[in-house]
Amino acid sequence: MTISLASDAYMAMVRAGRHQDGPQPDLPELRVAVLGDHATQQLVLVLRAAILEQGFSPAIYEAEYATAAMEAHDQTSGLYAFKPEIAFLSHAVQKYRARWLALTDSAAREALPEIYLAEVLEIIDALSRARIGVIASNFALPLERMFGNYGALTRQSLYGSVLAFNALLAQALGSQRSCQINDVMYLANRVGAENFFDERLWVSAKYLCANRCLPDIARSVARAAAVRKGRVTKCIVLDLDNTLWGGVIGDDGMEGIGLGGDPVGEAFQVFQRYLLGLKQRGYVLAVCSKNNEENAMEVFRSHPEMILREDDIAIFTINWNDKASNIEYISRVLNLGLDSFVFVDDSPFERELVRTALPAVAAPDLPEDVADYVAALERTGLFEAMGHSEADAQRNQMYREEGRRTTEELKFGNIDEYLRSLDMSIACGPFRQQHLPRIAQLIQRSNQFNLCTRRFSEADCGHFMNDSEHHVTVQAHLRDKFGDYGLISAICCDIDDGDLVIRELVMSCRVLKRGVEAFLMNHLFRACRERDLRGIRGEYRTSPKNRMVKDFYRDFGFDPLAGGDDDATGWFLAAARYPARPTLIRQVEL
Amino acid sequence: MTDEMVLEKLTEIFRDVFFDPGLVARPNMTASEVERWDSLSHIDMIVLVEEQFAIRFQTSEVNRMDNVGDLVKLIKAKLG
């Protein structure tokens, strides 16, 4: 695939960044502080455009040149006055190079990666304590090896020293999920270091890299920020003919389609393996194809070269309906929002149709050649994640079960009868250490059934868990006869002034309308009585997506507290006034 | 390529980079006369000139330019 190195894309983003004057009232705001040890003016313009591309109205604070440490350690700094949600820490490897070159003895050079890392982590920690989400860059790998190939093996080479730093940074951030990485090493590698660096621009104006590479950096940061705000994709909808295999199954038949065998057929297999990898890392795969269903299913069931099998797909919609309708159907059956969908189809016509009918669905362009599909999809940044958990690999299976439940639901005339037939059980109790990654992930990913959208990190959840004198936590796992839903709800509460105060309550939308909410509320009031608390105080904080739980507290009989407004309302209900709600869910041991 | 042709192309680039649709590149024009011509937008301008004329400036040439006339001379010299 050819990547244009001309600055057209860069200039287009500079123009867009300049034109964005002031907030965009129809978009949610994203407040970002940019802290760089290089010139950041142009990067800020481009970042503004990249944030707009992600559907947010950018508000950007640009710190003075190389003042990250000062700003972060000074509570009265402009940075904290600005109240950013996210701080983007951008480090130039040229600065690291200067430090490294200033060291003359080999022991000091050996130690530089750790020393530099400690300085960076101090900044990150200060920002994290202020509840600012940090996106920290690693370094582009420099061209200076000094030892040739051996440079990769020794910290006495600048190249080897930077390799060591990047590895240490990855290790440090991997265990601290409140901080995301901006992988400049990857971005520079993608265009090639000789294209990425422009030493003339560094010495002339402290320009981080060739300006045409700034869009990649800005888009990477904007995408990471969007994911922090809950804009994760969850479901990939796949076309079949010329997307998963070459040719048309209806015309060419099982023997005629291109899959394995020749180079093109092998390229389709490589693409299918990539999709399988995405499934294993937590994506739900669905099929949407205009075909005769029997012919197409036969490929999944018995084509010897097929990589994706029937079990790998959560739901098939193979018919002659228009694809937008099919995607809406998939969204309903799986109970996944359209804005978490990625539509992969080789046909520009179908992509355009879906973009027009369902603007929330991402329908990235695919190149002509299947061998370029993976690189093109990687470039979109749509698969950005903040972490991963053991449950990810099971997610597709859970949605397969969900599809079967929805089908079964249609058979029952009466909802209680249907719920009883599901034979549901919930295992719940306080947070457990081994479940913290999944708990934090649920808090990050839940948009609709999310009462406060506080986005507590894994570290925050650990804090709630460890201080059980002042906090109550609940994690809940649901099972039914079709299978295990896994961890479907997380609740963080304070104990304050004799009340149980719900600071955050999230639930997976997959388990709506099954009585899980009532089960959880019963559980919370039981905790209330066990600890002799007066009652439960809760808060509903409006987000663009959580209208569904607007009346959550009212429906359970809570009274609104004075002083609320459109964005946040407080609620209270005394434990003595709450009658336990009937549910069709058994409680089992966690 | 004549001076006029070079200036015409520069005018287009200047309008874009310095964000002023009324700018006209003149030989005696200097950076201080143009509101948004700072050290960073200067770099953008230089890179665009390189791409538009398919030339490459040396580091010493990136910042050493007293006025637009110098730039025109430099471009013409590089075009040969």
Image (cartoon, rainbow, N blue to C red):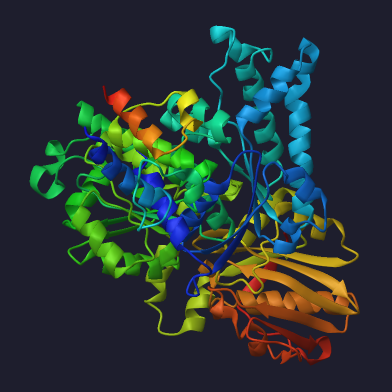
| Residue at 58% from the left image edge and 50% from the top image edge | A391
| Residue at 74% from the left image edge and 58% from the top image edge | A78
Q: Residue A456, relative to residue A502: is it above or below? A: above
| Residue at 50% from the left image edge and 27% from the top image edge | A200
Q: Residue A360, relative to residue B56: is it above or below? A: below
As drawn, is A246 to the left or to the right of A90?
A: left
Q: Quadrant of the C terminus of chain A?
A: bottom right
| Residue at 44% from the left image edge and 46% from the top image edge | A279
Q: Residue A417, relative to residue A278: is it above or below? A: below
As drawn, is A122 to the left or to the right of A242?
A: right
- Which picture quadrant has residue A99? top right
Q: Residue A545's spot in the image, x, y percent?
A: 53, 73
- Which picture quadrant has residue A235? bottom left
As drawn, is A375 to the left or to the right of A533?
A: left
Q: Quadrant of the N terminus of chain A?
A: top left
Of residues A49 and B51, the one drawn nearer to the viewer in this rendering: B51
Q: Residue A558's spot in the image, x, y percent?
A: 72, 89
Q: Residue A148's spot in the image, x, y percent?
A: 54, 8
Find the residue positioned furthest to the front.
Answer: B28
As drawn, is A127 to the left or to the right of A92?
A: right
Q: Residue A333's spot in the image, x, y percent?
A: 39, 68
Of residues A506 and A224, the one drawn nearer to the viewer in this rendering: A224
- Which picture quadrant has residue A466? bottom right
Of residues A29 and A10, the one drawn nearer to the viewer in this rendering: A10
Residue A573 in view in this figure: yes
Numbered label tally: 0
Residue A282 in view in this figure: no
